[in-house]
Each structure stands twice: as C-alpha cells, then as structure tokens.
Image: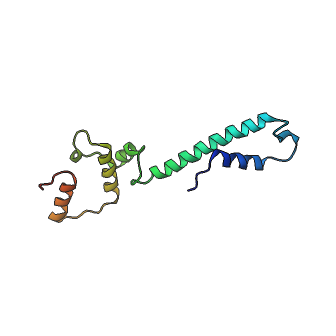
Amino acid sequence: MAIRTASDYYAQLRALLPPGPAWDKELNPEVDQLLQAAAQELAREDLRAADLLEESFPETVRELVPDWERVMRLPDPCLGDSPKFEDRQLAVRRRLVEVGGQSPAYFVELAISHGYPEA
C-alpha cells in the first residue's frame, strides 16, 4: 500500500480546484492554507490506515494485541502471571495459524517452546 505524503495530497487537492481567481494562491492565500491543512490531515489518516492494515495480521500486530487476545481467549495460564509483550504476540500468532497434533512429540515440542527445556 502506497502511503501518500502531505505534499502529494496538497498537489492533488490543488489540481482538483476549479479554474478562477477565487482559488488563486496570490489573490486568496487563505484557500492555500486550508488546502495545506487538509493535506496534512489526509496524510495522517493515510498513515493510520496503513497501520490498521498491519494490525490486522498477527505477524505484525502491536497496538491491537489486547483485542486479539480477547477474541482468542488469551493469555492462557501457560504463559504465567505476567508474560512479556513478545510472548503475548507469539501466543496470538500461534493460536491463529499453528496446526497442532496429538502425538507425544508435538506436546514435547510445545512444552520446550514455552520455556520448559527438560520436557
């Protein structure tokens, strides 16, 4: 997703204005100031939309980890009383994409990945 800057939006807004002296930069500088302010806001919203897109994937989630945890009923007791943020991200990712098994080898590997090297 291409993130547009304030200057990109300003140029686009300026190009969309109809012809005429009411929109001239020199004759009416307030319109230009308004366009620059609008361009700043549109660029900020564009950046936040890109952030939201990244938040929708468990591999890149940062801000919405609590929401993902609420939906997935995490953190579970296996993570302990106060898990690190990285462990919480990993738990969300695992809950969503990992496919488990019922073999002893799977559960041994799962225990090792949760910090029990002597499993």
Q: Which part of the image, by quadrant, shows the N terminus? A: bottom right
Q: Is residue 82 left or right of residue 59?
A: left
Residue 69 in view: yes
- Residues 23 and 78: in front is 23
Q: Is residue 44 left or right of residue 92?
A: right
Q: In this view, does 23 lie to the left or right of 102?
A: right
Quarter occupied by residue 96: bottom left
Q: Which residue is drawn at 23% across and 39% down?
A: 81
Residue 49 horizontal/vertical position (percent): 54, 48
Q: Which residue is drawn at 54% across and 45% down?
A: 48
Quarter occupied by residue 109: bottom left
Residue 34 horizontal/vertical position (percent): 73, 36
- The residue furthest left is 118
118 versus 75 height, above or below: below
Residue 73 in view: no
- The residue furthest right is 21
Residue 36 horizontal/vertical position (percent): 70, 39
